[in-house]
Image (spheres, rainbow, N blue to C red):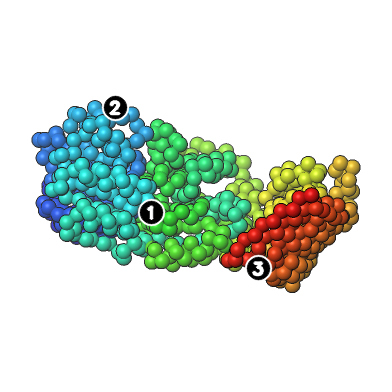
């Protein structure tokens, strides 16, 4: 079907033809004939990037009285970016219509200029809910003549907390208006709006309800939290022609990731709510012109990003609400093209992937983060392909060729090719030749790829997690990323490193490195990082071992710092620091005497029985341990 077959008015048909539109998308094909020249409410479900603006914009333009300056159509959108995009699209569609005025009103821009535009008269107003409420309260906009209200990205507006604003706005419009609701998903709140403000709405759904775009391939990688950024870089390098959006949860994280990418040589920038409107416009201009390779954005800021040919959407973190994944992934695979949506997750987050699969009615592919060899190969053949297809400007380069031939005359064709591609290949090979494997299993753990170390330095030596990491980096010469899971105790610490680094730390023992006149020693801990069966002992004056944590029934934990501490699952716990503490979790007895019974006191606790506490030799407190019985308290003083 063509736009002409949809029955578009000649001036609108001329405009969309000039814009390069030939065939309507499925949502356009279903909505335009139903809305054009008819009076009806409508609920339309379609994914982002399926052409929803034209689906409601073209029929909306046919309903306007261009000789009137009253606001006749109101379009609500969740973000300023989407407001601006819709306004631009409507202006393009109406290029050959005389007298049409479209005004976009949104936060982050001077309100007085928007008020002047409204007073001049606009048949169509495109607004964010917050700014429109402000204008209503200032009595700067008249909605009494509105015939059509369009709620674009209705689910996202509700996710952003605009429920009350939408109710207030809709209550300020005539009851005779038509409401057209467009949404990617259909949560309960969207259904509530439909039932409250619409009368027998026409329902149109493109694809399955709440489903994702079928043109998008969904992939997830499982890594440790500390390796998220390394995985992001690995992905970016594995897809040399990536033109993508990286989604983060917070504004601070968005800026941090963007700054790190820029520092590491990637063409990237951040888009979030702390930027001024001028800064946001500049970032989006660079992204649309493909000057940026990667745009790092928050969910809110990315609403309304209508950019074609986005190849990848990368979820640096999964969204708080699983439904928001649909909006994120909808930034790619637009207008019938294919795209890739990637999620970087930790083992704990794999369950969220399953939740998202149920919502988008699609399946994720679990993939391994590419290793260094795979990245180098991909980059190498990308370079070869570019050489093969590069445009040669014969006339411009002709005058330089004789000198070039002379310089390279001693090299064979094979040698020339090898050296030319090595110029680019060497850069990646040098960086990735000793790269670590970032992948871990969904079940967690370290896949046996890391080793836990003990070091006889701790808080008493003035160390904390950051300073001891810096110290370890300094004496070992290793990259800071290879030292992690640091646990600093009073007089000793634990840390983890990759197995390949074990010998380097053990070799430091032979160097006799001293700190504060004490020789530093490293020992491989027999305990697993995730915990294990057995015994853990810590001796306050000599050697220390870490043989496992006894949080499991049947194990034992002892701590000797001048005394003894034992813990039994269902058994007994003792602590000697000059005294004794016992705890019986089986409803037994707890005793505590401190300082070698210096205070002369005793404390017992019986599960369901009696608790006594003697603060001094002559003092006693007794409580009934049965909560369902009567409580008694006695105090004896000397």
Circle 1: is it few (<14), some (14-19), or many (20+) Cα within 10 Å?
many
Q: Earlier in the sequence, mark 3 or mark 2?
A: 2
Q: Nearer the viewer, residue 346 or 261?
A: 346
Residue shown at the point (69%, 52%) measured from the top left: 484
In the displayed structure image, the side of residue 216 where residue 515 appears, left or right: right
Residue shown at the point (26%, 31%) measured from the top left: 138
Q: Earlier in the sequence, mark 3 or mark 1?
A: 1
| Label 2 sits on residue | 112
Quadrant of the rendered structure where residue 630 is? bottom right
The answer to whether marks 3 and 1 mark residues whose Cβ atoms lie closer than 8 Å is no
The answer to whether marks 1 and 2 mark residues whose Cβ atoms lie closer than 8 Å is no
Q: CA distance from mark 3 to mark 2?
A: 72 Å
| Label 1 sits on residue | 327
Q: CA distance from mark 3 to mark 1?
A: 56 Å
- Quadrant where the N terminus is found in the figure: bottom left
Circle 2: is it few (<14), some (14-19), or many (20+) Cα within 10 Å?
few
Pinpoint residue 24: horizontal percent, then vertical percent. Answer: 23, 56
The answer to whether marks 3 and 2 mark residues whose Cβ atoms lie closer than 8 Å is no
Tell me, for residue 608, which label it has, or none. Answer: 3
Q: Secondary structure at mark 3?
A: loop
Q: Earlier in the sequence, mark 1 or mark 2?
A: 2
Pinpoint residue 215: horizontal percent, then vertical percent. Answer: 37, 61
Residue shown at the point (26%, 34%) measured from the top left: 137
Q: How many marks?
A: 3
Quadrant of the rendered structure where residue 395 is? top left
375 shown above or below 474: below
């Amino acid at each position: 079907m063509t736009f002409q077959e949809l029955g578009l008015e000649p001036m609108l048909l001329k405009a969309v033809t000039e814009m390069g539109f030939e065939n309507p998308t499925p949502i356009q094909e279903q909505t335009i004939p139903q809305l054009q020249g008819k009076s009806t409410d409508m609920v339309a479900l379609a994914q982002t990037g399926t052409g929803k603006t034209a689906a409601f914009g073209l029929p909306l333009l046919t309903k306007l009285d261009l000789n009137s300056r009253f606001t006749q159509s109101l379009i609500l959108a969740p973000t300023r970016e989407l407001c601006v995009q819709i306004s631009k699209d409507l202006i393009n569609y109406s290029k050959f219509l005389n007298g049409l005025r479209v005004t976009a009103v949104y936060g982050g821009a001077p309100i007085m200029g928007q008020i002047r535009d409204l007073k001049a008269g606009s048949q169509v107003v495109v607004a964010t809910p917050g700014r429109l409420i402000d204008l209503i309260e200032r009595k700067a906009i008249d909605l009494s003549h509105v015939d059509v209200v369009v709620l674009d990205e209705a689910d996202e507006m509700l996710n952003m907390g605009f429920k009350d604003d939408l109710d207030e706005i809709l209550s300020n419009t005539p009851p005779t208006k038509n409401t057209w609701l467009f949404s990617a998903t259909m949560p309960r709140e969207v259904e509530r709006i439909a039932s409250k403000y619409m009368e027998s709405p026409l329902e149109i759904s493109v694809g399955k309800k709440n489903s994702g775009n079928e043109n998008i391939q969904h992939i997830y990688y499982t890594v440790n939290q500390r390796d998220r950024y390394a995985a992001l870089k690995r992905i970016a390098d594995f897809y040399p022609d990536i033109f993508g959006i990286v989604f983060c949860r917070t504004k601070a994280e968005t800026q941090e990731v963007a700054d790190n990418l820029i520092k590491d040589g990637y063409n990237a920038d951040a888009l979030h709510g702390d930027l001024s409107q001028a800064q946001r416009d500049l970032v989006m201009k660079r992204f649309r012109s493909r000057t940026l390779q990667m745009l790092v954005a928050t969910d809110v800021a990315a609403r309304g990003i209508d950019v074609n040919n986005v190849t990848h959407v990368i979820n640096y973190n999964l969204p708080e609400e699983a439904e928001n994944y649909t909006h994120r992934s909808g930034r790619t695979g637009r207008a019938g093209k294919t795209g890739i949506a990637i999620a970087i997750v930790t083992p704990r987050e794999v369950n969220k992937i399953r939740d998202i699969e149920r919502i988008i009615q699609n399946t994720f592919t679990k993939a391994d983060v590419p290793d260094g060899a795979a990245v180098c190969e991909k980059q190498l053949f990308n370079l070869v392909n570019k050489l093969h297809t590069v445009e040669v400007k014969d006339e411009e380069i002709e005058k330089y060729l004789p000198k070039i031939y002379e310089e390279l005359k001693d090299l064979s064709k094979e040698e020339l090719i090898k050296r030319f591609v090595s110029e680019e290949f060497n850069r990646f090979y040098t960086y990735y030749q000793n790269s670590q494997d970032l992948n871990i299993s969904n079940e967690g753990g370290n896949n046996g790829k890391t080793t836990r170390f003990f070091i006889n330095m701790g808080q008493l030596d003035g160390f904390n997690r950051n300073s001891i990491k810096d110290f370890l980096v300094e004496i070992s010469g290793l990259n800071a990323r290879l030292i992690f899971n640091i646990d600093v105790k009073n007089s000793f610490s634990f840390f983890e490193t990759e197995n390949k680094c074990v010998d380097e730390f053990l070799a430091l023992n032979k160097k006799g490195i001293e700190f504060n006149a004490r020789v530093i020693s490293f020992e491989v801990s027999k305990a697993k990082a995730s915990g294990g069966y057995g015994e853990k002992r810590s001796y306050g004056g000599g050697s220390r071992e870490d043989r496992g944590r006894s949080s499991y029934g049947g194990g034992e934990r002892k701590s000797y710092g001048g005394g003894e501490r034992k813990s039994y699952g269902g058994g007994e716990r003792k602590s000697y620091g000059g005294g004794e503490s016992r705890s019986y979790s089986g409803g037994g007895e707890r005793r505590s005497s401190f300082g070698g019974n210096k205070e002369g006191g005793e404390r017992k606790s019986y599960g369901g029985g009696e608790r006594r506490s003697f603060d001094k030799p002559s003092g006693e407190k007794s409580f009934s341990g049965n909560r369902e019985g009567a409580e008694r308290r006695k105090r004896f003083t000397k």
